[in-house]
Amino acid sequence: MNKWATILFGLVCGLLAAGVILLVSMPPRGEPVRLQPPPTLGPLTVHVTGAVANPGVYTLPLEARVQDAFDAAGGVTTGADTTSLNLAARLQDGERVYIPLTPQEQPSDTGGASAGGNGEVEALLVDLNTATQAELESLPGIGPVTAQNIIADREANGPFQTIEDLERVPGIGPATFERLAPLITVDGAP
């Protein structure tokens, strides 16, 4: 029986060896995994508004900066306040780029301007009860939607009695109001 066991053991080992050789020598099945190239990012689309020659939506290269957006919109207009902007900041797709106007100065011959201690003329204040949408949008942090909300509020609720009434307008929170307070008035009384 020992002889048959040795033959049987040799036969099983031979079959296993043949199976391993067959598996190793077979070509791989299925399709190889192919990696796709990374997606190519397209150009940026930005909305340029405020004190620019041609406000609108512009398509700019991927690496565009704020200055590029203003250049695409025909440049800034006279009276534009670029001091608070980082003109070298990179743009993001779908971003709104707004350039405010500098506060206008009152002419000295109106008698309405008062000179400060250093002889400078104080800037005109925007009257919440009479300002147009464009005048409201010239305020920092006020875009078209918020300007429309201010106009809609004064039409629905009557004139603003105090500048603090501005906080009832959707989109005007305490931080925005604090920034606007020195620039606004109601019937000439801040």
Image: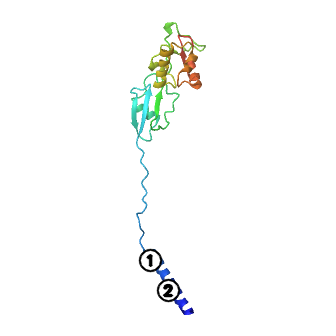
Dot 1: element? helix
Residue drawn at x 43%, y 30% is 48
Q: Amino acid at mark 1?
A: Leu
Q: Amino acid at mark 2?
A: Leu
Question: Looking at this view, is 145 or 101 the one in front?
Answer: 145
Which label sits in the foreground, 2 or 1?
A: 2
Q: CA distance from mark 2 to mark 1?
A: 16 Å
Q: Is residue 163 left or right of residue 22?
A: right
Image position of 170 with respect to 60: above or below:
above
**What's the mark number on residue 22?**
1
Quadrant of the rendered structure where residue 94 is?
top left
Crowd tier of the residue under label 2, counting other residues whose Cα lies within 10 Å: few below 14, some 14–19, many 20 or above: few
Image quarter in which the C terminus is found: top right
Crowd tier of the residue under label 1, counting other residues whose Cα lies within 10 Å: few below 14, some 14–19, many 20 or above: few
Q: Is residue 18 left or right of residue 168?
A: left
Question: Looking at this view, is 18 or 90 the one in front?
Answer: 18
Dot 2: element? helix
Residue drawn at x 47%, y 15% is 155
x then y, percent, for residue 70: 43, 31
**What's the mark number on residue 11?**
2
